[in-house]
Structures are given as C-alpha cells and as structure tokens.
Image (spheres, rainbow, N blue to C red):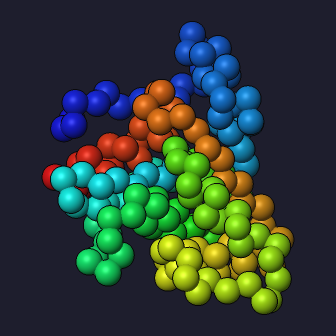
C-alpha cells in the first residue's frame, strides 16, 4: 500500500468487537446504521486538490476526483465540499446516509443554509457553486423524507471510513 498507512477494517466479531463498540462512531450507532455509512476527505497536497470518499457498505465503495480550478483559489473547504458532493451524488435519494467528515468547516457551510427559506441567497458565499449542488441534493433528500446525518469525526484516529477516505486521496493525488 502506498502512503505508508495500514488499512483499517471494522471487525465486529471476536476480540476486536469490544474496541469498535467503544468508538465514537459506534456510540452514535454508526456501525449498526441501517443506511449507507460514508466518510469524505478533501485535501490540498502540493498545490493539487483532491476529493474522495469511502463507503463502508458497498463493494465499489471508493470514489475520488481531482478538484479545483484557478477561479476557486485554494480554499480548503472546496475539496471537503467536493467529497461530500461525490458521496451525495452516489447515494440514492431514498437511502439513509451517515456522512462522516473530519472538518468542522463543511458542517458550518451546510448548516448555514438549513431552514433558511426561499429568500436565502448564495450570492457572495465562498464556494457557492459547489455548495449549491450539495444543498440541492440535500433538499431532494429532505423532500423525500430521507434522513441524512453529517457527523464530525477526529482525523487520523483510526476511524476506518475516515482512514479509507484519506487513503483514496493519497493514492490519487500523487
């Protein structure tokens, strides 16, 4: 494996079960969650921005892309939003979604637009174009009555989906 990271896998049987049952994600019932469990990661490495996610439930679970153009600048929120958008696009509107991210800025960016009504505008908002695309999918999910949970997790602490998303980015961005 490149990147120097060991792959982290959740094993809910045997001796490892007690460890995983004590993690933040399981205390939130994440490993027993009935929908998709996905972690996203955005990165700016050596001037190259990338975004990716890892889904704990699907066989073809990893997705990544290079993101960013000159007009976006080097906002660290841009690749984080791109990772979230990738995961939202690849999850059916009717599927429950638990999305794990290791940055609070993504949660703040999305939270600002929840429940603001029809008069809210993204004019002048940082990363407005990609934020608008994510909000549109979230709006469709809300209209369908599908739950979407965005949860902050600590980075580089051994959370399998988060580590998987990190690895997707490291493998692709070089």
Looking at the image, which residue sits at the far front?
124
Q: Position of residue 149 (x, y in %)?
A: 71, 54
Occupied quadrant, residue 3: top left
In the visual, does 98 lie left or right of 117? Answer: left
Which of the two residues, 70 or 167, is positioned nearer the viewer here? 70
Q: Position of residue 150 (x, y in %)?
A: 66, 53
Which of the two residues, 10 or 67, is positioned nearer the viewer here? 67
Q: Which residue shows up at 67% across the image and 86% down it?
A: 121
Position of residue 124 relative to residue 106, above or below, is below
Q: Position of residue 81 (x, y in %)?
A: 49, 65
Looking at the image, which residue sits at the far bottom?
119
Q: Which residue shows up at 72% across the image and 78% down it?
A: 139
Occupied quadrant, residue 15: top right
Q: Position of residue 46 (x, y in %)?
A: 18, 53
Position of residue 16 relative to residue 49, above or below, is above
Q: How many marks?
A: 0
Position of residue 117 relative to residue 112, above or below, is below
Q: Is residue 60 visible?
A: no
In the visual, does 154 lie left or right of 143? Answer: left
Q: Is residue 163 visible?
A: yes
Looking at the image, which residue sits at the far top?
15
Which of the two residues, 102 or 63, is positioned nearer the viewer here? 102
Q: Which residue shows up at 74% across the image and 36% down it?
A: 29
Quarter of the rendering occupied by the N terminus: top left
């Amino acid at each position: 494996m490149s990147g120097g990271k060991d792959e982290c896998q959740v094993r809910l049987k045997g001796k490892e079960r007690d460890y995983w049952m004590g993690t933040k994600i399981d205390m939130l019932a994440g490993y027993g969650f009935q929908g998709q469990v996905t972690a996203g990661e955005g990165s700016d490495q050596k001037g190259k921005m990338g975004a990716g996610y890892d889904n704990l439930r699907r066989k073809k679970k990893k997705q990544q892309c290079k993101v960013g153009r000159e007009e976006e600048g080097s906002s660290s929120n841009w690749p984080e939003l791109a990772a979230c958008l990738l995961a939202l696009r690849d999850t059916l509107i009717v599927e429950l979604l638990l999305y794990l991210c290791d940055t609070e800025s993504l949660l703040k960016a999305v939270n600002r637009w929840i429940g603001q009504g029809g008069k809210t505008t993204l004019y002048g908002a940082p990363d407005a174009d990609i934020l608008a695309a994510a909000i549109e999918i979230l709006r469709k999910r809300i209209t369908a009555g599908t739950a979407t949970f965005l949860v902050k997790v600590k980075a580089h602490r051994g959370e399998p989906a988060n580590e998987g998303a990190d690895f997707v980015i490291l493998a692709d961005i070089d």
